[in-house]
Image (cartoon, rainbow, N blue to C red):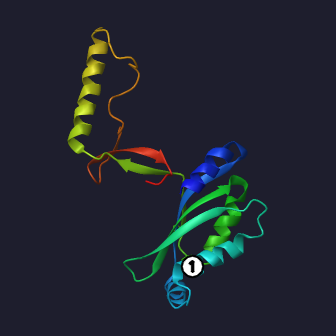
Amino acid sequence: MKALGKHHHTHRADGWKLASITVNLPFLRSTALTMRKKGPATAYGDAIADRLKHLARKPRFFLVLEDSADETLHAHLCMIYHSDDKKAIQQALKLDAASNNASVMFKHEYRQYEPDRDQGDIDREMDAAREVARAAGVPDDEEEPEDSYSLYQLYDQRLDRYYRMKPVDIG
């Protein structure tokens, strides 16, 4: 991950992107991969690398395979690629993927949930109190009054948790 992050930091102005990619594999492909002598993850990684070797700007990636509830496999890839090559990469990944529309998903951000609900609530209460004080004309003595205390401003109603969006990283 450090190598991908460093490459992205150095080349993002040139159009390189860092993505988290999930590929849902159908039953037959999952079974075929589990029977491979070199191991399913290595076999799948080799297949992807072989399909992408024609690209002038070689994407770099690593992957893990996990079992799904329906007894198939799904792959999680972390990949640095040039944005002009996204369509070719998607097509290469779809050769193995299940036939549904969500079989290959690219994400450039992820949700980081607040680690401590109570601390998050305190920070949001401080943000609300600060806004009330500002509206009443009370001067703010903070160095950066525009910043909120809470880093986790977005709310996931399904989980009843606050989160923030972060670029793909080791998290």
Residue displayed at 32% across by 29% down = 149
Measured from the top left, where is residue 67 in percent x and y? Answer: 41, 78
Q: Can you identify the residue that label 1 sits on?
A: 42
Q: Name the residue at 70% across, 48% down.
A: 15
Q: Amino acid at mark 1?
A: Thr
Task: Name the secondary structure under disc 1.
Answer: helix
Residue 95 in sight in this render: no
Q: Residue at x 36, y 28 (%)?
A: 148
Task: Note whether residue 21 is visible.
Answer: yes
Binning the other alpha carbons within 10 Å of mark 1 as few (below 14), some (14 to 19) or many (20 upward) gives some
Residue 144 image point, x, y percent = 40, 20
Task: Tell me the quarter of the picture where residue 82 sits.
Answer: bottom right
The one of 125 and 63 positioned closer to us in this rendering? 63
Q: Is residue 147 left or right of residue 41?
A: left
Q: Is residue 42 above or below residue 101?
A: below
Residue 48 image offset from top left, x and y in percent? 64, 74
Q: Position of residue 65 (x, y in %)?
A: 48, 74
Q: Quadrant of residue 47?
A: bottom right
Using the image as rendered, state which of residue 64 and residue 104 is in the foreground.
Answer: 64
Residue nearest the observer in this picture, 96 or 170? 170
Does residue 13 lie above or below 35 as drawn? above
